[in-house]
Image (tube, grey):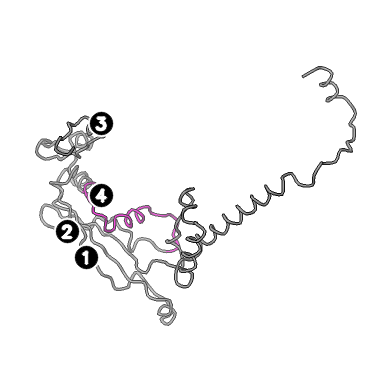
Amino acid sequence: MPEELRQKMLHAAPVPSDRAPERRWAYSLAGMLLVSAFLLYHLSVLLVWNGPGKDLAKNFQSTFLKGVKGYEYFRGTRQDQSWAMFAPNPDRVNVFVKVFVVDQRGEVWDFGQDIHSQDRYPYWFYDRRGKVNRNIDGKKNLQRIYGAWVCREWERQHGGESAREVRFVKWWTDVPEPRVVIENGGWDQWSAPYKEFVQEKIECRTAEQGTLPNYLRERYGLPPIDEATQFRPVQIRTWRQQDAAPTDVRKQ
Protein backbone atom coordinates (compact mmCIF):
# COMPACT_ATOMS: atom_id res chain seq x y z
CA MET A 1 0.00 0.00 0.00
CA PRO A 2 1.41 3.46 -0.86
CA GLU A 3 2.63 5.43 2.16
CA GLU A 4 0.50 8.46 1.32
CA LEU A 5 -2.69 6.41 1.20
CA ARG A 6 -1.81 4.59 4.41
CA GLN A 7 -1.26 7.86 6.30
CA LYS A 8 -4.49 9.28 4.96
CA MET A 9 -6.48 6.26 6.05
CA LEU A 10 -4.92 6.23 9.51
CA HIS A 11 -4.71 9.91 10.41
CA ALA A 12 -6.89 11.98 8.11
CA ALA A 13 -10.10 13.55 9.47
CA PRO A 14 -13.31 11.83 8.46
CA VAL A 15 -14.93 13.26 5.37
CA PRO A 16 -18.70 12.95 4.82
CA SER A 17 -19.84 11.42 1.56
CA ASP A 18 -22.91 12.66 -0.26
CA ARG A 19 -22.76 9.88 -2.85
CA ALA A 20 -26.14 8.20 -3.18
CA PRO A 21 -26.63 4.67 -4.55
CA GLU A 22 -27.37 4.50 -8.23
CA ARG A 23 -30.42 2.26 -7.74
CA ARG A 24 -32.74 1.26 -4.94
CA TRP A 25 -32.14 -2.52 -4.99
CA ALA A 26 -28.87 -4.44 -5.03
CA TYR A 27 -30.16 -6.84 -7.72
CA SER A 28 -32.08 -6.40 -10.90
CA LEU A 29 -35.82 -6.96 -11.09
CA ALA A 30 -35.33 -10.08 -13.23
CA GLY A 31 -32.92 -11.56 -10.68
CA MET A 32 -35.28 -10.89 -7.77
CA LEU A 33 -38.22 -12.46 -9.62
CA LEU A 34 -36.13 -15.52 -10.51
CA VAL A 35 -34.94 -16.05 -6.92
CA SER A 36 -38.44 -15.46 -5.53
CA ALA A 37 -39.95 -17.99 -7.94
CA PHE A 38 -37.33 -20.58 -6.99
CA LEU A 39 -37.90 -20.03 -3.24
CA LEU A 40 -41.66 -20.30 -3.71
CA TYR A 41 -41.26 -23.55 -5.65
CA HIS A 42 -38.78 -25.03 -3.16
CA LEU A 43 -40.87 -24.14 -0.10
CA SER A 44 -44.05 -25.49 -1.72
CA VAL A 45 -42.42 -28.83 -2.52
CA LEU A 46 -40.80 -28.94 0.93
CA LEU A 47 -44.09 -28.35 2.78
CA VAL A 48 -46.12 -30.79 0.70
CA TRP A 49 -43.37 -33.46 0.79
CA ASN A 50 -43.09 -33.34 4.59
CA GLY A 51 -46.83 -33.04 5.16
CA PRO A 52 -49.10 -35.97 5.99
CA GLY A 53 -49.35 -38.47 3.15
CA LYS A 54 -52.27 -40.46 4.48
CA ASP A 55 -56.04 -40.45 4.18
CA LEU A 56 -57.43 -37.21 2.67
CA ALA A 57 -54.02 -35.65 1.98
CA LYS A 58 -52.67 -38.70 0.14
CA ASN A 59 -54.16 -37.89 -3.28
CA PHE A 60 -53.29 -34.19 -3.02
CA GLN A 61 -49.67 -34.87 -2.07
CA SER A 62 -49.12 -37.35 -4.90
CA THR A 63 -50.89 -35.19 -7.53
CA PHE A 64 -49.04 -32.02 -6.53
CA LEU A 65 -45.56 -33.54 -6.43
CA LYS A 66 -46.05 -35.30 -9.75
CA GLY A 67 -47.41 -32.14 -11.36
CA VAL A 68 -44.50 -29.91 -10.34
CA LYS A 69 -41.84 -32.64 -10.72
CA GLY A 70 -41.26 -32.53 -6.96
CA TYR A 71 -40.16 -36.16 -6.75
CA GLU A 72 -37.48 -35.64 -9.41
CA TYR A 73 -36.32 -32.36 -7.86
CA PHE A 74 -35.93 -33.62 -4.28
CA ARG A 75 -34.44 -36.99 -5.19
CA GLY A 76 -32.10 -35.43 -7.74
CA THR A 77 -30.80 -32.94 -5.16
CA ARG A 78 -30.73 -35.58 -2.39
CA GLN A 79 -33.19 -33.73 -0.16
CA ASP A 80 -35.75 -36.51 0.19
CA GLN A 81 -36.52 -37.83 3.66
CA SER A 82 -39.17 -39.93 5.32
CA TRP A 83 -41.20 -39.13 8.41
CA ALA A 84 -43.00 -42.47 8.52
CA MET A 85 -41.78 -43.16 12.07
CA PHE A 86 -43.76 -40.16 13.37
CA ALA A 87 -47.49 -39.42 13.53
CA PRO A 88 -49.97 -39.75 11.90
CA ASN A 89 -48.90 -43.38 11.39
CA PRO A 90 -47.45 -44.58 14.72
CA ASP A 91 -46.67 -48.21 15.48
CA ARG A 92 -49.68 -50.33 16.39
CA VAL A 93 -47.70 -53.16 17.97
CA ASN A 94 -44.92 -53.40 20.54
CA VAL A 95 -42.37 -55.84 19.14
CA PHE A 96 -39.52 -57.57 20.98
CA VAL A 97 -37.15 -60.26 19.74
CA LYS A 98 -36.23 -62.63 22.53
CA VAL A 99 -32.95 -64.55 22.27
CA PHE A 100 -32.82 -68.04 23.80
CA VAL A 101 -29.81 -70.35 24.09
CA VAL A 102 -30.12 -74.15 24.12
CA ASP A 103 -27.17 -75.68 25.99
CA GLN A 104 -25.61 -79.11 25.44
CA ARG A 105 -28.04 -80.69 27.92
CA GLY A 106 -31.06 -79.36 26.01
CA GLU A 107 -32.03 -76.75 28.60
CA VAL A 108 -33.35 -73.45 27.21
CA TRP A 109 -32.02 -70.19 28.68
CA ASP A 110 -33.22 -66.63 28.09
CA PHE A 111 -30.07 -64.72 27.10
CA GLY A 112 -31.70 -61.42 28.10
CA GLN A 113 -31.13 -59.43 24.91
CA ASP A 114 -34.58 -57.80 24.69
CA ILE A 115 -35.64 -54.87 26.87
CA HIS A 116 -39.17 -56.02 27.69
CA SER A 117 -40.11 -55.46 31.33
CA GLN A 118 -36.77 -53.70 31.93
CA ASP A 119 -37.52 -50.17 30.71
CA ARG A 120 -40.03 -48.05 32.60
CA TYR A 121 -41.06 -44.57 31.60
CA PRO A 122 -39.60 -42.11 32.25
CA TYR A 123 -36.10 -43.58 32.38
CA TRP A 124 -32.72 -41.91 32.74
CA PHE A 125 -30.62 -43.84 30.21
CA TYR A 126 -31.56 -45.13 26.77
CA ASP A 127 -30.55 -48.74 26.13
CA ARG A 128 -29.25 -49.12 22.56
CA ARG A 129 -30.18 -52.78 22.67
CA GLY A 130 -33.75 -51.68 22.03
CA LYS A 131 -32.81 -50.32 18.61
CA VAL A 132 -30.68 -53.38 17.80
CA ASN A 133 -33.54 -55.59 18.92
CA ARG A 134 -35.98 -53.86 16.55
CA ASN A 135 -33.54 -53.97 13.64
CA ILE A 136 -33.00 -57.74 13.75
CA ASP A 137 -36.75 -58.46 13.70
CA GLY A 138 -37.40 -60.73 10.71
CA LYS A 139 -33.94 -60.17 9.18
CA LYS A 140 -32.30 -63.59 8.91
CA ASN A 141 -28.99 -62.24 7.67
CA LEU A 142 -28.63 -60.06 10.77
CA GLN A 143 -29.87 -62.80 13.06
CA ARG A 144 -27.19 -65.19 11.77
CA ILE A 145 -24.47 -62.66 12.62
CA TYR A 146 -26.05 -61.82 15.96
CA GLY A 147 -26.57 -65.49 16.76
CA ALA A 148 -22.90 -66.26 16.10
CA TRP A 149 -21.95 -63.58 18.63
CA VAL A 150 -24.37 -65.09 21.18
CA CYS A 151 -22.70 -68.49 20.64
CA ARG A 152 -19.26 -67.02 21.26
CA GLU A 153 -20.43 -65.04 24.27
CA TRP A 154 -22.04 -68.14 25.78
CA GLU A 155 -18.71 -69.98 25.44
CA ARG A 156 -16.87 -67.12 27.09
CA GLN A 157 -19.28 -67.04 30.02
CA HIS A 158 -19.37 -70.85 30.51
CA GLY A 159 -15.73 -71.86 30.57
CA GLY A 160 -15.47 -72.64 26.87
CA GLU A 161 -18.51 -74.94 26.72
CA SER A 162 -20.36 -74.33 23.46
CA ALA A 163 -24.11 -73.99 23.15
CA ARG A 164 -26.19 -76.22 20.92
CA GLU A 165 -28.26 -73.52 19.21
CA VAL A 166 -29.61 -69.98 19.47
CA ARG A 167 -33.29 -69.22 18.90
CA PHE A 168 -34.81 -65.88 17.92
CA VAL A 169 -38.42 -65.60 19.06
CA LYS A 170 -40.62 -62.69 17.99
CA TRP A 171 -42.74 -61.55 20.92
CA TRP A 172 -45.33 -58.80 20.47
CA THR A 173 -48.43 -57.15 21.93
CA ASP A 174 -51.12 -55.22 20.04
CA VAL A 175 -51.65 -51.54 20.82
CA PRO A 176 -55.39 -50.86 21.29
CA GLU A 177 -57.20 -48.01 19.54
CA PRO A 178 -57.37 -44.67 21.38
CA ARG A 179 -61.10 -45.01 22.08
CA VAL A 180 -60.48 -48.36 23.81
CA VAL A 181 -57.77 -46.83 25.99
CA ILE A 182 -60.04 -43.91 26.91
CA GLU A 183 -62.97 -46.19 27.73
CA ASN A 184 -60.83 -48.39 29.97
CA GLY A 185 -59.11 -45.49 31.67
CA GLY A 186 -55.66 -46.43 30.40
CA TRP A 187 -53.63 -49.39 29.18
CA ASP A 188 -50.77 -51.38 30.68
CA GLN A 189 -48.71 -52.80 27.83
CA TRP A 190 -46.52 -54.78 30.24
CA SER A 191 -49.44 -57.00 31.28
CA ALA A 192 -51.16 -57.13 27.87
CA PRO A 193 -51.67 -60.56 26.23
CA TYR A 194 -48.85 -61.38 23.82
CA LYS A 195 -48.18 -63.52 20.77
CA GLU A 196 -44.94 -65.24 19.79
CA PHE A 197 -43.31 -67.48 17.19
CA VAL A 198 -39.80 -68.70 16.41
CA GLN A 199 -38.19 -66.71 13.61
CA GLU A 200 -34.77 -68.33 13.26
CA LYS A 201 -32.55 -71.03 14.75
CA ILE A 202 -28.76 -70.78 14.62
CA GLU A 203 -26.71 -73.94 15.16
CA CYS A 204 -23.51 -72.85 16.89
CA ARG A 205 -21.44 -75.78 15.59
CA THR A 206 -22.03 -74.90 11.93
CA ALA A 207 -22.44 -71.11 12.16
CA GLU A 208 -19.67 -68.95 10.71
CA GLN A 209 -17.57 -67.73 13.67
CA GLY A 210 -20.00 -69.45 16.01
CA THR A 211 -17.04 -70.65 18.11
CA LEU A 212 -14.30 -68.66 19.84
CA PRO A 213 -10.99 -68.94 17.97
CA ASN A 214 -7.92 -70.03 19.87
CA TYR A 215 -6.38 -66.56 20.17
CA LEU A 216 -9.49 -65.38 22.06
CA ARG A 217 -9.61 -68.57 24.09
CA GLU A 218 -6.05 -67.93 25.19
CA ARG A 219 -6.99 -64.37 26.17
CA TYR A 220 -9.96 -65.57 28.26
CA GLY A 221 -8.07 -68.51 29.78
CA LEU A 222 -10.15 -71.17 28.01
CA PRO A 223 -8.94 -74.53 26.69
CA PRO A 224 -7.92 -74.54 22.99
CA ILE A 225 -9.81 -76.32 20.24
CA ASP A 226 -8.88 -77.90 16.93
CA GLU A 227 -9.70 -74.98 14.65
CA ALA A 228 -9.39 -77.15 11.55
CA THR A 229 -12.50 -79.11 12.55
CA GLN A 230 -14.28 -77.00 15.19
CA PHE A 231 -14.01 -73.44 13.90
CA ARG A 232 -15.75 -72.17 10.77
CA PRO A 233 -14.33 -68.83 9.56
CA VAL A 234 -16.20 -66.28 7.49
CA GLN A 235 -15.57 -66.72 3.79
CA ILE A 236 -14.31 -63.33 2.62
CA ARG A 237 -14.11 -62.63 -1.10
CA THR A 238 -12.73 -59.24 -2.12
CA TRP A 239 -13.06 -57.42 -5.42
CA ARG A 240 -9.37 -58.08 -6.07
CA GLN A 241 -9.97 -61.83 -5.90
CA GLN A 242 -12.97 -61.48 -8.17
CA ASP A 243 -10.97 -59.58 -10.79
CA ALA A 244 -8.15 -62.13 -10.61
CA ALA A 245 -10.49 -65.08 -11.13
CA PRO A 246 -10.35 -66.66 -14.63
CA THR A 247 -13.19 -65.73 -16.96
CA ASP A 248 -15.65 -68.43 -17.92
CA VAL A 249 -15.71 -68.40 -21.72
CA ARG A 250 -19.14 -70.04 -21.70
CA LYS A 251 -20.63 -66.85 -20.21
CA GLN A 252 -19.27 -64.64 -22.97
- Marks 3/4: CA–CA distance: 28 Å
Of the numbered discs 3 and 1, the one sitting upstream in the chain is: 1
Which numbered disc, 2 or 3, marks the residue closer to the eye? 3
Q: Residue furthest bottom?
A: 183
Could you tell me residue 192's position as x and y percent? 32, 73
| Alpha carbon separation for disc pair 4 and 1 | 18 Å
Indicate which disc, 4 or 1, sits on the residue closer to the N terminus. Answer: 4
What's the CA distance linking mark 2 and mark 3?
44 Å
Which portion, as a residue range, is magenta? 121-150
Q: Earlier in the sequence, mark 4 or mark 2?
A: 2
Up the image or down, 73 lies above or below 62; here it is above
Q: Amino acid at mark 1?
A: Phe
Mark 1 lies on a secondary structure that is strand
CA–CA distance in space, label 2 to label 1: 15 Å
Q: Which mark is residue 146?
A: 4
* Residue 164 rendering spot, x and y as whole percentages: 13, 51
The residue mark sitting in front, 3 or 4, is 3
Give the residue at x 65% y 53%: 36
Secondary-structure class at tag 2: strand
In the picture of the structure, the residue carrying the numbered disc 2 is 108
- Mark 4 to mark 2: distance in Å? 18 Å
* Residue bearing mark 3: 240
Q: Amino acid at mark 4?
A: Tyr
* Residue that mark 1 sits on: 197
- The rendered magenta stretch, by its main secondary structure, is classed as helix
Q: Categorize mark 1 by other alpha carbons within 10 Å: few (<14), some (14-19), many (20+).
A: few
Mark whose residue sits in front, 4 or 2: 4
Q: Position of residue 225 (x, y in %)?
A: 12, 37
